[in-house]
Image: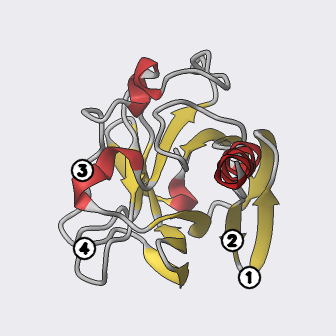
C-alpha cells in the first residue's frame, strides 16, 4: 500500500510540474536587455546587430526534432498563422522539420532569414557541433545566445543598418517536454519595432 501512495505522489508531482517552463526570451542590444515573458509582446530595437538569449535542452542527434529553439521571422504585413496552445507542432507549416533554414558556411546563422515558410533551428550539442553560443549550462539544459548581424529579406542579405522595413515578427517555439504539442509557456511571438 505504501508503494501505491508513493507512486501516486510521484505521478501527481510530475503532472503538476510538467508545464512549468521558464521560456524567457531576451533581446540584447548595446548592453540593454529586453526580456519577453508573455506569449505576445512588442519591443523596440535600433537597426543595429543584436543577440537573442534563450533556454533550451543540449542537442542530442538521436532526437533532434524535439530539441533546440525553432525561430521564424515574418514581415509585419504577412498574416500570422493561427497558432495556439494545444496545437500539434506538425500542423504549423513553418515549424515542420523539413522546413529548416540551412546554416552559413561557418555553421552559424549571422543573417536572420525572413521567410513565412521556414525556420531557424538553434541548437548546441558541443563546441564542435552548434550554431549558438553557450552562456550557461546545467546538466541537459543551457542558456544560449544567437547573434544577429544581418537580415536576409526579399532575396537580399542586408546589414541591420540598411533594413528597409521598420517591423518584423519573431516567432519562437521550444518543445520543452518533446511531446510535439504547443504547451503553455513554450511559444513566444515578439513584434520588433526598429527605429
Marks 3 and 4, the one that precedes in the sequence: 3
Q: Residues within 10 Å of mark 4 (few under 14, many from 20)?
A: few
Task: Identify the element where label 4 is drawn.
Answer: loop
Camera-side residue of 1 and 180? 1
Mark 1 in CB contact with mark 3 (< 8 angstroms): no
Instruction: Say which residue label 1 marks.
Output: 31
Asked if residue 109 lies left or right of residue 74, the reply is left
Above or below for 44 versus 74? below
Mark 3 in CB contact with mark 4 (< 8 angstroms): no
Position of the C terminus, as image quadrant, is bottom right
Mark 2 in CB contact with mark 1 (< 8 angstroms): yes
Q: Residue at x 74, y 82 (%)?
A: 31
Instruction: Say which residue label 2 marks.
Output: 28
Marks 2 and 4, the one that precedes in the sequence: 2
- Give how far apart the Cα atoms at labels 2 and 1 are: 6 Å
Asked if residue 91 lies left or right of residue 46, the reply is left
Residue 26 x %, y %: 70, 64
Instruction: Say which residue label 4 marks.
Output: 129
Task: Identify the element where label 2 is drawn.
Answer: strand
User: Closer to the camera: disc 2 or disc 4?
Assistant: 4
Above or below for 190 versus 74? below
Task: Identify the element where label 1 is drawn.
Answer: loop
- Identify the disc placed on residue 102: 3
- Give how far apart the Cα atoms at labels 1 and 3 are: 29 Å
Residue 154 x %, y %: 38, 35
- Identify the disc placed on residue 105: none
- Give how far apart the Cα atoms at labels 2 and 4 are: 24 Å
Camera-side residue of 149 and 23? 23
Asked if residue 165 lies left or right of residue 36, the reply is left
Mark 4 in CB contact with mark 1 (< 8 angstroms): no
Q: Residue furthest front?
A: 1
Q: Residue at x 41, y 28 (%)?
A: 94
Amino acid at each position: 500500500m505504501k508503494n501505491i501512495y508513493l507512486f501516486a505522489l510521484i505521478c501527481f508531482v510530475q503532472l503538476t510540474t510538467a508545464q512549468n517552463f521558464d521560456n524567457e526570451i531576451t533581446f540584447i542590444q548595446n548592453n540593454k536587455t529586453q526580456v519577453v515573458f508573455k506569449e505576445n509582446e512588442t519591443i523596440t530595437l535600433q537597426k543595429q546587430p543584436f543577440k537573442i538569449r534563450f533556454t533550451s535542452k543540449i542537442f542530442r542527434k538521436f532526437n533532434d526534432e524535439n530539441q533546440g529553439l525553432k525561430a521564424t521571422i515574418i514581415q509585419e504585413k504577412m498574416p500570422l498563422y493561427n497558432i495556439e496552445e494545444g496545437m500539434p507542432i506538425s500542423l504549423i507549416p513553418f515549424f515542420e522539420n523539413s522546413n529548416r533554414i540551412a546554416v552559413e558556411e561557418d555553421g552559424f546563422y549571422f543573417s536572420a532569414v525572413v521567410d513565412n515558410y521556414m525556420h531557424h533551428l538553434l541548437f548546441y550539442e558541443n563546441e564542435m557541433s552548434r550554431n549558438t553560443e553557450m552562456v550557461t549550462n546545467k546538466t541537459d539544459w543551457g542558456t544560449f545566445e544567437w547573434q544577429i548581424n544581418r537580415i536576409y529579406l526579399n532575396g537580399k542579405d542586408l546589414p541591420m543598418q540598411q533594413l528597409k522595413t521598420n517591423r518584423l515578427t519573431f516567432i519562437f517555439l521550444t518543445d520543452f517536454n518533446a511531446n510535439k504539442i504547443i504547451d503553455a509557456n513554450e511559444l513566444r511571438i515578439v513584434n520588433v519595432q526598429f527605429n
